[in-house]
Structure formats: structure tokens, C-alpha cells
Image: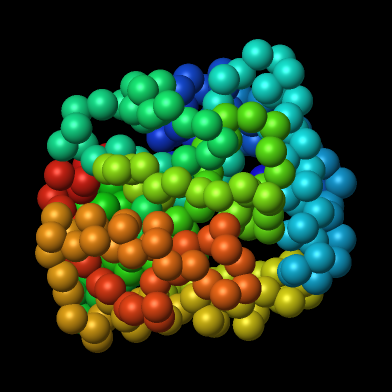
């Protein structure tokens, strides 16, 4: 579900369309005032009445709607349903030589599957403003391995996502080996400043949230950088074992801030 987010939605439709077929994409526009995208003619696009309320309440309603839509798709015959925000891209490590569909088909998912959360940032001393006409990962080279984006994005049945796709209600999670959820929402300081100026988001109480998310850029600029291949395995294990005291079915990481260099093999993917 998106609102005023064509920048990300174009990447989202191009990626998932290439992996599972554009005819299997379901996009919900938050507000009947939103224009229908014309770059994905085979996708199913449904404008819905704008979900009212401040961030927390509106987010619960949004995920209830999307979970119900996922349940409908299972009734229509789908085996798996992927749910993400428009700035989240689920990627299989290209070293495996598999498409996303091939990977998921062999994954043996019982309830849900998560990719390890990769919150892509910007190194302000090395990287310039993002360009839409070039692959994102050819322009961004650092990321925060973050529990916030280790989400149970893939469902194997009509279960209920919690707010933001961050958990499946009443069920545990499993992080797939070599599966990553890349988050691009806060990877460019210029775009973050633009979002501060969005009147719809400001009215819904998003300004504090957006300002908080700019810390990813601070982390990627100032914290030590770790080798990806030496780090992702033990971080996956830690997130699988550690749980926050307030939510046993979410990953934990003991407040560690781990920044990694994204390998070159990812740079032309998205």
C-alpha cells in the first residue's frame, strides 16, 4: 500500500514483476485521490479510502486490510504471498544463482519466512544524491544490519501481520539463509528532507518518525564498517536467538549497531 510514493513504487514493480510476474502484483493506493500508475499495466491496482488517524492507529488498520487481502489470495489459489512496503526489496544472494521464485519454491515455508534486514544508508562523505536512472546499489555501498527490517514478509497461509509487517501474530519467525530484505526508505538525505515537507505525512505524525530514521545515514557515515560475508551469518543467528522482552516473536540484537559493506555482486540488481 502506497501514497505519493512513485519513486519507490517504480522500482518495486520492476523488481517483483521480473521475479514473479507483473500479473501477480497487488498494489493498494492509500486514498482514492491517488493517480493510477501507468507503468505496470498487468498489475492489480486498487484505490482504497484513505486510512485515517495518527501513525500507530492507521498502521494497524493498514495491516489488517493487507492481511485480509492476503487471505483472499490464498483462497484464490496462491501458495505464498509476499507483503512489503514499496521501499523494501526481498533479494536472494546473487551468489546462489537463483531467482526469488526459485528460492521460495524450495524453502519449505510452514508459516512465514523473513529476509535478514539490510537498512541501506548513505555515506555523506563518499556518496552523492541518489539518481533514479541508475541502480540503487551501484550508488550506495553501506548498510545497517537491522532487526527492524528482518520482517516475516513471506506468508504460507492466511495469517495476520502485525503493524508494518514486523511480525506474524501468534507465530514465530524464521530467517532464510541468503535471503535479505533491503530497505531503501532512508538511504538519501535529500529525500528524507523532502519527506519532512510532505503535508500528508506531517499531519499524520510522521515527522518525528522520519527524523529518527535519518540515524541510518549517521551510522553509515561514522561507524566502523564490517565485511558482509564474515558478518551476516552470525548476525542472522543472533537475531534468531535473541528476542526483545516486549515481543517474543520479533528478532533481537542486544542493541548492537553493525554496519557492513554491501558486496559488488549486488550492485546491478536494483
Quarter holding the N terminus is top right
Task: Kindly identify the residue that appears in the image at 61 percent across and 18 percent down.
Answer: 78
Q: Nearer the viewer, residue 192 or 65?
A: 65
- For residue 18, say whether it is visible: no
| Residue 123, image quadrant | bottom left
Residue 70 percent coordinates (x, y): 69, 32
Can residue 166 be seen at all in this image of the molecule?
yes
Say which residue appears at 51% left-offset and 49% top-offset. Answer: 173
Q: Is residue 249 left or right of residue 104?
A: right
Residue 159: x and y in percent read 69, 38
Q: Measuring 37% from the left and 53% from the top, which residue is drawn there?
A: 116
Q: Quadrant of the C terminus?
A: top left
Query: Residue 113: horizontal and vertical position, in percent?
Result: 47, 41
177 or 179: nearer the viewer: 177
The vertical placement of 110 against 263, above or below, is above
The residue located at (49%, 76%) in the rendering is: 213
Total numbered badges shown on the rendered structure: 0
Spot occupied by residue 157 in the image (x, y as percentages of width and height): 64, 29
Amino acid at each position: 500500500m502506497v501514497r505519493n510514493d512513485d519513486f519507490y513504487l517504480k522500482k518495486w514493480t520492476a523488481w517483483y514483476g521480473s521475479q514473479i510476474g507483473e500479473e501477480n502484483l497487488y498494489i493498494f493506493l492509500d486514498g482514492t485521490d491517488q493517480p493510477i500508475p501507468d507503468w505496470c499495466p498487468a498489475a492489480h491496482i486498487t484505490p482504497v479510502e484513505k486510512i485515517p488517524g495518527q501513525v500507530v492507529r492507521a498502521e494497524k488498520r493498514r495491516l489488517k486490510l493487507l492481511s485480509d487481502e492476503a487471505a483472499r489470495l490464498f483462497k484464490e489459489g496462491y501458495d505464498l504471498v509476499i507483503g512489503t512496503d514499496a521501499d523494501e526489496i526481498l533479494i536472494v544472494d546473487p551468489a546462489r544463482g537463483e531467482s526469488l521464485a526459485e528460492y521460495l519454491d524450495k524453502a519449505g515455508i510452514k508459516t512465514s519466512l523473513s529476509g535478514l534486514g539490510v537498512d541501506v544508508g548513505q555515506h555523506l562523505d563518499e556518496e552523492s544524491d541518489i539518481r533514479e536512472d541508475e541502480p540503487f546499489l551501484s550508488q550506495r555501498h553501506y548498510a545497517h544490519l537491522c532487526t527492524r527490517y528482518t520482517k516475516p514478509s513471506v506468508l504460507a497461509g492466511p495469517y495476520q501481520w502485525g503493524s508494518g509487517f514486523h511480525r506474524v501474530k501468534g507465530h514465530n519467525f524464521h530467517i532464510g539463509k541468503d535471503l535479505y530484505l533491503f530497505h531503501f526508505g532512508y538511504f538519501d538525505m535529500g529525500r528524507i528532507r523532502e519527506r519532512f515537507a510532505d503535508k500528508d505525512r506531517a499531519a499524520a505524525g510522521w515527522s518525528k518518525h522520519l527524523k529518527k530514521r535519518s540515524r541510518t545515514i549517521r551510522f553509515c557515515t561514522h561507524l566502523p564498517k564490517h565485511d558482509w560475508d564474515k558478518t551476516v551469518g552470525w548476525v542472522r543467528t543472533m537475531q534468531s536467538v535473541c528476542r526483545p522482552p516486549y515481543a517474543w516473536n520479533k528478532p533481537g540484537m542486544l542493541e548492537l549497531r553493525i554496519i557492513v559493506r554491501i558486496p559488488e555482486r549486488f550492485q546491478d540488481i536494483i
